[in-house]
Image (spheres, rainbow, N blue to C red):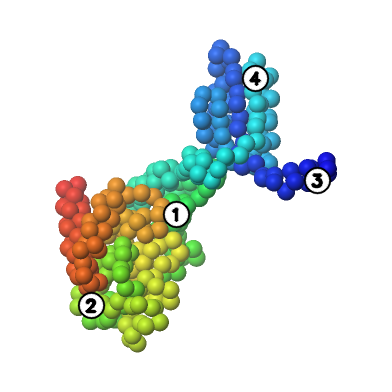
Amino acid sequence: MLFHILHMRKVLYMPQTWLSLIMSLPTQNSTARMRVWRSLKSLGCVALRDGVYLIPYGVEIKQILDNHLQDVCDSGGSGYLLAVDATDKQQSETLKRLFDRTADYASAIEAIKQFRSTLKGIEEGAARRGINRLRRELAAITAVDFYPNQARDQAMTALLGAETEVESRFSPGEPRARPEAITRCDKTDYQGRIWATRQRPWIDRLASAWLIKRYIDPKASFCWLAKPKDCPKGAVGFDFDGAEFTHQGNKVTFEVLLASFGLQEQEPLSRLGAAVHYLDVGGVPRPEAAGLELILRGARASADSDDALLKQAIKTFDLIHAAWLQELKADL
């Protein structure tokens, strides 16, 4: 009978998910308090309340926290290191969100963007010191990103783009990695074409179709496919598996089109690309994304065909693009 109970416990046992350090230090020992706090922050712990810290379970992390607990006790304090599990899936997801590093990645991407804007006016030494600093800052974020998402991929792609630009500027003869192997296309080969994509288009396909009409092929016509295999011979496919232009690396189709036709350096288009990326696959939030999604949802609800939806979407993107152009001119 005892064996049966022990066996059942073994079957029902679930691995612990979290480590919680609960500690108390004398208020007068500010040096030890600051030392432990800085170390816990560098590990990626989050504070549930004063003196209660949480981090995903890991053998190495447990050893480090054991050492911190000993430090707390040696400094006149007390504490416990507990292995705990969430009560259910919902609570587990809530705890995971405490470790979301999206805001940190957004700051890193902005820093990379600012760095690239200064490259033309600085010397090689300063540029290389700058890129090394950005590498360290991003590495510090990824080291404590226990549940990575699209935001990390975006930040890594942004850093790789900056590294490539530095190498291109100061070491043009050296071989270097490319962010993605995207082939540069000649617009003259894509005039008056039929562009085919999946029917019932949404954010990425609508924005891509707008980009095609406004910047690549003004006389383009669009074919909405029930299945990708229905793509007409000679049509240019986009945003479906096997299409000529579709997701590549960390880029959504709109961003791939920007890179393919050399449009990624235009600030309003790059800004729109970031919003489309977020709405299509997630990542770093954009302040304009919610409004854009709401308008397009309204257009989709009222349109009686994909052509009608695209017509409304083109008006929306035209207005957004015009507003951003105006902002850009005002800043100059």
Q: Is residue 290 visible?
A: yes
Asked which quadrant contains residue 23, the reply is top right
Q: What amino acid type is highlighted by mark number 2?
A: Ala
Instruction: Say which mark, if any, is on residue 78.
Output: 4
Q: Is residue 121 visible?
A: no
216 versus 115 height, above or below: below
Q: CA distance from mark 4 to mark 3?
A: 39 Å
Specify few, some or many for label 2: CA neighbours under 10 Å numbering under 14, 14-19, or 20 or more. some
Q: CA distance from mark 1 to mark 3?
A: 46 Å
Which is more toward the observer, 293 or 189? 293
Residue 244 image point, x, y percent: 38, 76
Q: At numbered mark 1, what does the secondary structure look like: helix, strand or loop?
A: helix
Q: CA distance from mark 2 to mark 1?
A: 32 Å
Residue on which disc 1 sits: 150
Residue on which disc 3 sits: 4
Q: At numbered mark 3, what does the secondary structure look like: helix, strand or loop?
A: helix
The mark nearer the N terminus, 2 or 1, is 1
The mark nearer the N terminus, 2 or 3, is 3
Q: Are marks 1 and 4 in contact (CB under 8 Å)?
A: no
Q: What amino acid type is highlighted by mark number 3?
A: His
66 versus 74 height, above or below: below
Which is more toward the observer, 125 or 23? 23
Q: What amino acid type is highlighted by mark number 1?
A: Gln
Mark 2 vs mark 4: in front: 4
Q: At numbered mark 4, what does the secondary structure look like: helix, strand or loop?
A: strand
Measuring 31% from the left and 62% from the top, which residue is drawn there? Answer: 203
